Image (spheres, rainbow, N blue to C red):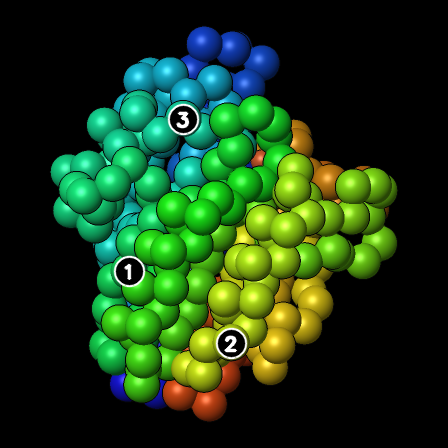
Amino acid sequence: MADGLLIAQISDTHIQAANPESKARLGDLARTVRSINALPRKPDLVIHSGDVAHDATAADYAAARAELARLTMPVYATVGNRDRRDPFFEAFRPDGYLPAEHHFAQYAVEVAGLAIIAIDTFDDQSALGGFCSRREAILKRLLADATGRPTLVFAHHPPLELPDMKPPLLQYRDVAEARSLADCLAGHAGLVGVIAGHVHRARSVRLGAVSLSTVPSIAADLSREKVAETYLRRPIYHLHTVSSGGMTTQTLMLDSAEAAAA
Ligand SMILES: [Fe+2]
C-alpha cells in the first residue's frame, strides 16, 4: 500500500434538525468540514464512526449529508446508536459503498492497498453496542477477503472496556458479543488499528497487537472530555496516518465557536 495514507476520523455529529437548541451542531460539522478541506495535506478519505443523526429523521440526514458533501475526498460512514438503518441507508446509499445483500452498515472498501472495514454495532434494544452472529459471519468474510493487506477497522461502539470512564466500562449490552467482535479483530494478522466513537472522549487501549482508539464528538455541546473552560465548544477530530507498519494518530481541536464567528 501507499505508505502514509492520511485518514480524518469524525464522529458523533448528532445532527438534530427539529431542535433549534441543537442548531450549533450543524455549525460544528460545517467548521470541521472546512478544517479538513483546508489541511496542508489533504486526507485521502474521511471516516464518520456513527451517530451521524440524533433523531434519525430524513431531515437530520439531509442536513448532515449536505455538509459532508462539501468534503473534497471520499467519506465512509457507519451507524451509531442514535442512527436508524433505514433512513441512514436511504441517505448514504447514493455514495455506493453500502451493501445491497444485507441491511447492516457493515462493508469493506479498499483505498491505495489499505482494506477499510466498517462494522455495524447498532443494537435495537439499547443505546449500547450489539454484534449478532449474522454480523460476526459477515465480518469474518470481510476479514478473510482482506487477508494479506493491511486492514483498518472502524465501528461506533468500542468492543473493549475503556479506562477512566463511568460505568458501564464496556459499551455493549451483551459481554459475549463484544468479546466475539474483539476476538475476531485481534485474530486478524494484517490489522493496523481499530477506531471508534460513541463515548465522546478520546481513549486508547490495546486490542491484540494494535490500538483501539475513540475520538471525541464533533457535536461540541455533547463532549464528555474534561477540558478547561477555554476549550469548550470546540469540535475535535482525529487524523490517522496509516502505513503497512502501523498507525499514528494526531488530535485536532477546532477554534472555539466564538473565535470562528469573529
Ligand atoms: Fe454519540
Residue placed under numbered mark 1 in the picture? 108
Which quadrant contains ligand 1?
Answer: top right
What is the total number of numbered labels drawn onto the structure image? 3
CB of mark 3 near ligand 1 (< 8 Å) = no
User: In the image, which disc is placed on residue 45?
Assistant: none
Query: Label 1 neighbourhood size at 10 Å, few (<14), some (14-19), many (20+)?
Result: many
The quadrant of the image that shows the C terminus is top right
Q: Could you tell me if the residues under marks 1 and 3 are in contact, i.e. CB atoms within 8 Å?
A: no
Q: Amino acid at mark 1?
A: Ala
Q: Nearer the viewer, residue 259 or 91?
A: 91
Q: Nearer the viewer, residue 29 or 137?
A: 137
Residue placed under numbered mark 3 in the picture? 84
User: In the image, which disc is placed on residue 187?
Assistant: 2
User: In the visual, does 247 lie left or right of 145?
Assistant: right
Q: What is the distance, in whole Å, between disc 1 and disc 2 at their CAs? A: 18 Å
Q: Amino acid at mark 3?
A: Arg
How far across and down, in percent of the image, does residue 80 sit?
Answer: 49, 37
Local secondary structure at mark 3: loop
Does label 2 or label 3 sit earlier along the sequence? Answer: 3
Query: Label 3 neighbourhood size at 10 Å, few (<14), some (14-19), many (20+)?
Result: many
Residue name at image x 69 percent, y 65 percent: 204
Q: Amino acid at mark 2?
A: Gly
How far across and down, in percent of the image, does residue 54 sit?
Answer: 50, 24
Does label 1 or label 3 sit earlier along the sequence? Answer: 3
